[in-house]
Image (cartoon, rainbow, N blue to C red):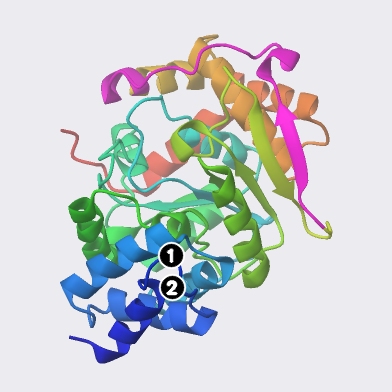
Amino acid sequence: MSAEFRELLKKVGSGPHTSKALTRSEASQAATLILDAVATPAQIGAFLIAHRMKRPVADELAGFLDAYDRACPPLVALDLRSRLTVLGNPYDGRSRTAPLTPVTALILAAANVPVLMHGGDRIATKFGLPLIDIWQQLGVQFKGLDRSQIRQLLANANLSFLYTPEHFAATTTVNDYRAQIGKRPPIATVELIWTPYTGLVHLLAGFVHPPTERFMQDTLALRGVESYTLIKGLEGSGDLPRERTAIISTQRRGDTQPQRLKLHARDYDLHGPDLPLESLEVLIAQIEATLTGQDTEYSRAAIWNGGFYLWSVGAAETLEAGFEQARSLLQSGAATNVLTRLQQATPQPALV
């Protein structure tokens, strides 16, 4: 048993009337004791549940991220063409709606906006489809890359992926607790806004519940992340919905406060259904058809997302220009060329 961790657990787990928030330093200490497996399984499980019930505050989330940076040092910055975009996605994957994030990443990369993604394999609570499986089926093997190769892909293809089971193995143990307690702990929010890169970034992340948006904004301010876009997206991802209003907060460097947006795909003639995730095979067929310029519901959703993000990160002057640019990058084959470079630069995956 860790006596040090027990005191931190007592502080957050004393009930609704006497529990207290941890300081940023204490939260960093707690996360380090969890990641290093110094705390016992009973202590860790109790902490994750107690912290979920108490609800996190920005200082705590910032402290967790400080610990993440020590346990998995961010990639050394490159001399990139523009500010790096970090795409933060739910680590438990997608189970109901078809993911659009890989195509969004290809569109951004084709527009010379470098993109870094991160994540692992299927985990609780949804055990949904993770991004790494989608990329593998597209012929891109991000597993097995060392840190220099990850950076090289960023430099040469504008797109790369940090596979956390290999580069941040301590999170695998934490994921086991997530399965056992059956609920997403606040660490799930930390994963969404983690930026494993030392240079200037624009963070793209999704959320489900409105309080989470505020937690994220305050945490990013404490961490000095001054450029971001947060979306009430599909299944907590950054994918913009088309069936309902897209609720967004975005901030760019120099802004004094985030800009609040409510966008309707219908206003841009890009409305339609939020497509179900039928199977990995169907999804890959949808992506491949989109990359060949076919006009489908999936491709319209990809243009809605890609065009918005081109505008959000500053690669397009207006939303309308972003949508036209996204459509052009898909129809001209520019996005496919990025995929081809990734396929050629990574080992051929063993498809199953």
What residue does disc 1 label?
A: 16
Q: Is residue 292 visible?
A: no
Relative depth, front residue between 115 and 175: 175
Give yes or no for contact between labels 1 and 2 (Cβ–Cβ under 8 Å).
yes
Query: Left or right: where does residue 125 sit relative to residue 62?
Result: left
Closer to us: 336 or 124: 124
Q: Amino acid at mark 1?
A: Pro
What segment carries the magenta color?
257-283
Asked if residue 47 is positioned above or below residue 22 in the image, the reply reads above
Q: Kindly identify the residue that appears in the image at 36 percent across and 48 percent down.
A: 91
- Residue 22 in picture, x, y percent from top left: 48, 77
| Residue 80 highlighted magenta (yes or no) | no
Query: What is the quadrant of the N terminus in the image?
Result: bottom left
Q: Residues within 10 Å of mark 2 (few under 14, many from 20)?
A: some
User: From the viewer's perspective, is residue 1 above or below residue 303?
Assistant: below
- Inter-mark Cα distance, 1 to 2: 6 Å
- Foreground pick, 41 / 204: 41
Question: Where 231 falls versus 203 (above or below)?
Answer: above
The residue depicted at 60 percent of the width and 29 percent of the height is 305
Question: Which residue is at the front of the view, 129 or 285?
Answer: 129
Residue 281 among magenta residues: yes
x then y, percent, for residue 36? 27, 79
According to the image, label 2 marks what residue?
A: 19
Image position, residue 270 (x, y; %)? 65, 14
Look at the image and tell me whether residue 132 can be seen: yes
Q: Amino acid at mark 2?
A: Ser
Residue at the far front in the pictured view? 17
Q: Is residue 277 left or right of residue 112?
A: left
What residue sits 84% from the left and 60% below the top?
A: 254
How would you rate the neighbour count of disc 1 (Cα within 10 Å): few for under 14, some for 14-19, many for 20 or more?
Answer: few
